[in-house]
Image (spheres, rainbow, N blue to C red):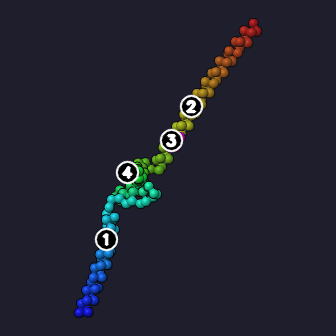
């Protein structure tokens, strides 16, 4: 009888431990299969991680609404490589420098023309005053 009672007690203890551990196991299973994971950042802000896509959103609690701004654009890889971006920047810089040079040359031609007109004006004015 004592053996039966101690066996029954041991089984009850194991069943009790299983019941205690079961909600924790269920909670772990639910969180690991859920689509989103939330992490508290501040008192009114949380980070939301979409486990399926890897998208991260910053969510702010305003009254009863959770407003989230996502990072889907930041999480995607760029369409062009780093080298292509650098080449494009260099080409744009060269184009801008060429435009600046052309603009300076045009301004200098205009200034030269204005100086020529002024010289003509002063030479005519001095020739009329000497006559």
Q: Is residue 40 visible?
A: yes
Residue extending farthest to the front is: 63
Q: Is residue 88 magenta?
A: no
> Where does the N terminus fall, quadrant-wise?
bottom left
Residue 105 picture quarter: top right
Q: Are marks 1 and 4 in contact (CB under 8 Å)?
A: no
**What separation in Å lies between label 1 and label 4 (alpha carbons)?**
30 Å
Q: Residue at x 52, y 37 (%)?
A: 95
Judged by its main secondary structure, the magenta piece is helix
Q: Is residue 75 visible?
A: no
**What separation in Å lies between label 2 and label 1 (alpha carbons)?**
76 Å
Does dot 3 land on a helix, a strand or a loop? helix
Q: Residue at x 27, y 82 (%)?
A: 12
- On residue 102, which mark appears? 2
User: Crowding at label 4, few (<14), some or many (≥20) Cα neighbours within 10 Å?
Assistant: few
Q: Which residue is mark 3?
A: 91
Mark 1 or mark 3, which is nearer to you?
Answer: 1
Q: Which residue is mark 1?
A: 23
Sequence-wise, the earlier of marks 1 and 4 is 1
Q: Which residues are magenta?
A: 89-93
Percent position of residue 3, x then y: 25, 92
């Amino acid at each position: 009888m004592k053996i039966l009672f101690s066996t029954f007690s041991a089984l009850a203890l194991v069943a009790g431990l299983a019941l205690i551990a079961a909600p924790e196991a269920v909670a772990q299973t639910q969180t690991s299969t859920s689509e989103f994971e939330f992490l508290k950042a501040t008192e009114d802000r949380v980070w939301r991680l979409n486990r399926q896509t890897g998208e991260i959103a910053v969510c702010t609690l305003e009254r009863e609404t959770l407003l989230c701004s996502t990072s889907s654009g930041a999480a995607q890889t760029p369409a062009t490589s780093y080298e292509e971006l650098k080449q494009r920047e260099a080409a744009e810089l060269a184009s801008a420098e060429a435009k600046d040079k052309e603009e300076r040359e045009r301004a200098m031609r205009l200034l030269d023309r204005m100086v020529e007109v002024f010289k003509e004006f002063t030479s005519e004015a001095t020739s009329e005053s000497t006559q």
